[in-house]
Image (tube, helix red, strand yellow):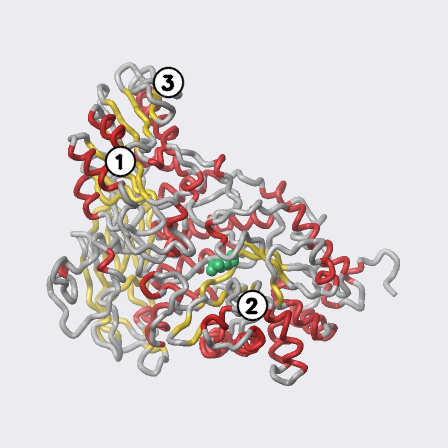
Amino acid sequence: MPHHGEDPRTRSDRPWADPARPVEERVAALLDAMTLPELVGQLHQPANVDLERDAALLAAGAIGSTLHASGATAGNVRDGGVSRDRVDDLQRAAIESSRLGIPLLIARDVIHGHRTVAPIPLGQAATFDEQVVHDVAARAALEASADGLTWTFAPMLDVVDDPRWGRVAESFGESPLLTARLGAAAVRGFQASGLVTACAKHYVGYGLSRGGRDYATAEVGEITLRNRHLVPFRAAVDAGVGTVMAAFCDVDGVPMHSHHHLLREVLKGEWGFDGVVVADWNGIGELVEHGVAADLRDAARLAIEAGVDVDMVSGAYAAHLAALVEGGEVDLELVRDAARRVLRLKVRLGLLDPDCASLPGRGDLAGSHGLGLDRALAREAAARSFVVLRNDGMLPLRPRPTDTVLLTGAYTRERASLLGTWVLDGDPEQVSAVAPAVVRALGELAELAELTAGAGDAGGADADGDAVGVVAEPTVRRVLVDDGAFADRTLRLARDADLTVAFVGEHAARSGEDGSTSDVGLPPGQLEVLRGIAALGSRLVVVVLTGRPLALGEVLDLADAVVLAWHPGTEAGEALADVLVRGVPATGRLPMSLPRSVGHLPITHAERPSGRPLPDEARGRGRYIDAPSSAGVPFGAGASALAYGSLTAASGEVTRDGEAVVTLEVTNRSDREVREPVLLFLRDEVAEVTRPVRELVDVQVVTVPAGASVPVTFRVPAHAFGYHGRDHAFRVDPGRVVLTVGWPRADASAVVLDVV
Ligand code: BGC
């Protein structure tokens, strides 16, 4: 019997609740106390557990975790939102009605913000800045944990070179190194408070979905897997990620939910991952659809043997695992090992501690975190994610006092879609819309010029309804706003404008899960309108809001300035106003190449050399008859305020366990301080297997005061020149490597080093 007044969670017969004991001891004690159905319960993850419907399961300890989601492709279908009260009720039921009182893991897809929303991950990747990604993730996790959530299904670490695949929006782009760096930063950020676990997904190969069709098969050999697609997952494991999600795809014929080699031998074996492998939504059930399991029972057996610990929604484990063990078809130790991993995670998250902040009545997280205060971070992240692809002296906008400015396009007044895919709890009403923000910023210019700016929807420019209005009419300047609903009206307004800013691009629902497209141009009709505006002779600035890299070749020819702004999140309008009008430098770079056409896909800066490479960069390697073969705009491109000096090496030699030190001087030619990424690329000239013609090998993000010159030093361990060879083992060869800084710019320079 417990002593009077003793907290029931720290009773001496519950050693697992004692935070003073080592994690593994607490986990072992709990495992030993559990029955087979309770062990299986820890592996069962239904969606949206309901207090009444699922009361008996909660009482039996038959549910280990739950996810809040609107359905199988929740990224583009909103639900009613998550609420702390509902989460608390669930936890109370799990703790108070069950024999062992183990709390649930409560999961949700908190991908690029929770209530305050930052740019989509692909936009964040354009900053090339680990700090930005870390801070955004840390902030999102704090907001999520205030709602009682303990598990986010992010970051997505699929390396991808085909923008037909809608999920590129959730990725960090085409570079394994960038994905690894930013992925690890996101993991550290999400897990910084210790209250939330991250999830590295989708392990592995999903970014190779054939033809860009979601869920489709991945054809890839193990050398490429190891040198490219596994790299970010290894980095996430090294950063301490708590969970990894299996991918929907099959890899070379073996569905990932049954991939014993990649899950058990590589992830849990070679890499020593001691966290949880979770299935993707019904991924275990889909082994039947893949045609490798006869039925759900068979699927449960294959998945647990392969190393999938938690069954998201298929119910296969709950229905069949105990019987499979009792029938001798599945080893009990596999189930105990999976449960051990879940319990270890719960202990690490403090869920079994008496004073756990994630549990009901244990602290006011919302109050202590100051929810929603960090719009400044979202605004900075958005502004830094914008990539200026062209600027013929147009930005920042400085309309002449007599100019009429037209803001046009579906995005002038849109809010919800600016949040991008996978935003479940961000409030569209909180989004700063584009036109009001830009009009306000133009008004500030007017004030600076001591002009009297009018404001508000004065209307009446064409007297034809809500969508058009004179929204600012200073004494010498007019700003018209048009939502682009009628192309003919847009052209009429553009005819009379001196400067047109067109906000075009994709709706968020055209990207994300199950958002594949067979065309990667602007959505139908938009290019036609841009052609029409350009033909009228108005100066034209095009801002592209998008979830994927688009083929923008003709747009770059038509416009005087082009800004690629992704889906920027809660602070979209203000961030755009900052860059378009207030002169905040846009220093984003392309984390994925922009293709010339859909026929050029897939495409990456890190192609491997063929036996017949072409010397002419513009025509690329392996020519098409009907078009240049290279990217429309390559990876790494984007406006820069910095002039680069030549790269120099501290020594021409580097030992295999040493580091290369290379330096260049950069000079800020602008009148503002800038924070910009500087990219270093590697070419390994001779190796046991073909190595990319160039691949990103390091990034330095530097802050340079206006007009100043500063040295930028890269310290690259020779380890970074290594690769997995013919036997799949990692090796660093002796021989020449070329390091290049500045590609694809005109002032790129290189050094050659000998690895000895
Ligand atoms: C997606 C995952 C997501 C899961 C839970 C799946 O459809 O592929 O990325 O985490 O649903 O919502």
Q: Residue at x 32, y 70 (%)?
A: 718
Q: Is residue 93 visible?
A: yes
Q: Name the quadrant of the N terminus.
A: bottom right
Please report whichever mark, 2 or 3, sits nearer to the chain's N-terminal start. Answer: 2
Distance (Cα) linking label 2 and label 3: 58 Å
Left or right placement of residue 453 versus residue 247 in this view: left
Label disc, if present, on residue 458 of the rendered structure:
3
Dot 2, crowdedness within 10 Å: few (<14), some or many (≥20)? many
Label disc, if present, on residue 12 of the rendered structure:
none
**SS at mark 2?**
strand
Q: Residue at x 35, y 58 (%)?
A: 165
Q: Position of residue 363 (x, y in %)?
A: 68, 47
Which amino acid type corresponds to the residue marked 3 in the rendered image? Answer: Ala
* Pointer 3 residue Cβ closer than 8 Å to ligand 1: no
Front tag of 2 and 3: 3
The residue at the far bottom in this view is 328
Please report whichever mark, 2 or 1, sits nearer to the chain's N-terminal start. Answer: 2
Q: Nearer the viewer, residue 186 or 245?
A: 245
Dot 3, crowdedness within 10 Å: few (<14), some or many (≥20)? few
Q: Residue at x 35, y 44 (%)?
A: 384
Q: Position of residue 326 (x, y in %)?
A: 68, 82
* Pointer 1 residue Cβ closer than 8 Å to ligand 1: no
Label disc, if present, on residue 671 of the rendered structure:
1
Q: Residue at x 33, y 51 (%)?
A: 548
Which amino acid type corresponds to the residue marked 1 in the rendered image? Answer: Asp
Q: Name the quadrant of the C terminus.
A: bottom left
Q: Is residue 733 above or below residue 131?
A: below
Q: Nearer the viewer, residue 246 or 465?
A: 465
Residue picked out by circle 2 = 276
The quadrant holding residue 699 is: bottom left
Which amino acid type corresponds to the residue marked 2 in the rendered image? Answer: Val
